[in-house]
Every structure is written in structure tokens, then in C-alpha cells.
Image (cartoon, grey):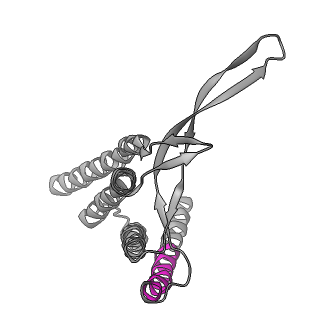
Amino acid sequence: MKTNYRIINFLRILFKVFYKLSIISFVLLGIGHLIHLFVPINVPEIPFVGTAKLKIDTAYDLLLGGHFNDNIEIGLELGRIQSNDLLYRIIALLNLTTSSLISIFLFKNAWQIFEELHNRKENGNYFSINIYSRIKKVGFLMLVYPIYFFMNGAIISWLLLDNVSFMGQEVHFHPDYTLLTKIISVLVIFVFAEIYRAGIEIKEESAYTI
């Protein structure tokens, strides 16, 4: 039990630090972006989660015999787009605000979960409807991340990006559809939340029985 308490206390401190750092980072970067709206200092970078396919000639030999010589498709990722136009400086600020707020509220709820678990050490009752609600909030916030970056890739690929060429070939970017598979892994959190809620109900029923 002492080991579990140490883990809870460690995670409580860890997520609190992440929460504070995410706020400080948002404030500092936000001030920089706001200044850059009016005084262009450097070219802003907008994260871009999109992919494209490029066909290239490839050849290789196998040590145990055999040879391959053909063209294959490789995946391309830009990672970010850059432009000093006012529109893109505004988009960079909106992107920073959205991603930062998601992180802030995610770390805040995670910290509050372990803070309440830490405070409940005395009575030994670790079941709380508040903790259940915060676990679900963490799940929803983690769900927003892949959806947000998928929309990021879709908007930039289909509405903002045009005439992209690489090694003399024109390539067409599209959103990274593998992001949608991350939604499945996030659903585990909701399953855990419902198991925790079932524990709350069992605890309440046992209390009534006594």
C-alpha cells in the first residue's frame, strides 16, 4: 500500500509540474506570437500533420542472392509550413492557443485526479464521482488531440497547400489517416472510467448493506 501511495504522490507532483510548465509555456509563446502579429520578427511555423507519396527508382542486392530494381512509393511529411503573411501569423497563434489549452486542461485534470487520491489516503476511500468525472474529461481531451491534428492536416492539405513539388515530381498531400486509429487507443480510458464508476456503485451498495 505504501508503494501505491508513493506512486500516487509522484504522479500528483509530476502532473502538477507539467500543468504549471504548460501555463508558463503558453504565456511566453503567446506573447511572442502576439508581438509577431504586428512586428514580423521571424517566419512563423505552423505544424502540419499531412502525408504524401513519392515514387522513386530503387535498387538493391540481397546478400544471399537476388536483386531488386524498380520504383517504389515512399511517404513524405512536411511537418510544418512557413509563411510570413498576416493570415498565417494569425493561424499560427490560433494553433498555439488550441494545442496549449488542450495540454493545460489535460494536465490540470490529471493532476486533480491524483491530488484527490492523495487527499483520500486518510479514510482509505479512493472512490469518488469527482475522480470519475475527471477521468472522463482526460479521455475527451486526449480524444480531441488526434481529431484536431487530423483536421489540421485536412485544412492545410485541401485548402492552403498547392503546387508542391519534390525532386522534380508534383506531390499531393492529404491528412494523416493513421491519426484516426489513435482514437481507438483513447477509448481504453473511457473503459477504465466505467470500471471505476462500477467500483463506486459497488462501494455505495456495500455501505448500504452494512
Q: Is residue 195 left or right of residue 204?
A: right
Q: Position of residue 23 (x, y in %)?
A: 45, 80
Task: Tell me, yes or no, whether the highlighted magenta stretch contains residue 23.
Answer: yes
Task: Tell me, yes or no, whether the highlighted magenta stretch contains residue 203.
Answer: no
Residue 105 lies in quadrant: bottom left
Look at the magenta stretch and give its main secondary structure: helix
Q: Position of residue 85 (x, y in %)?
A: 43, 74
Q: Which segment is the magenta one? A: 16-36
Q: Nearer the viewer, residue 69 or 209?
A: 69
* Residue located at (53% from left, 56% from top): 79
Q: Nearer the viewer, residue 71 or 62?
A: 71
Q: Position of residue 13 (x, y in %)?
A: 52, 74
Is 158 situated above or below 56? below
**Which residue is outermost to the top?**
65
Note whether residue 165 is visible: yes
Q: Position of residue 185 (x, y in %)?
A: 40, 43
**Which residue is outermost to the left?**
208
Total labels: the figure holds 0
Note whether residue 115 is visible: no
Location of the C terminus by quadrant is: bottom left
Q: Nearer the viewer, residue 105 or 4?
A: 105
* Residue located at (33% from left, 63% from top): 125
* Residue located at (33% from left, 57% from top): 144
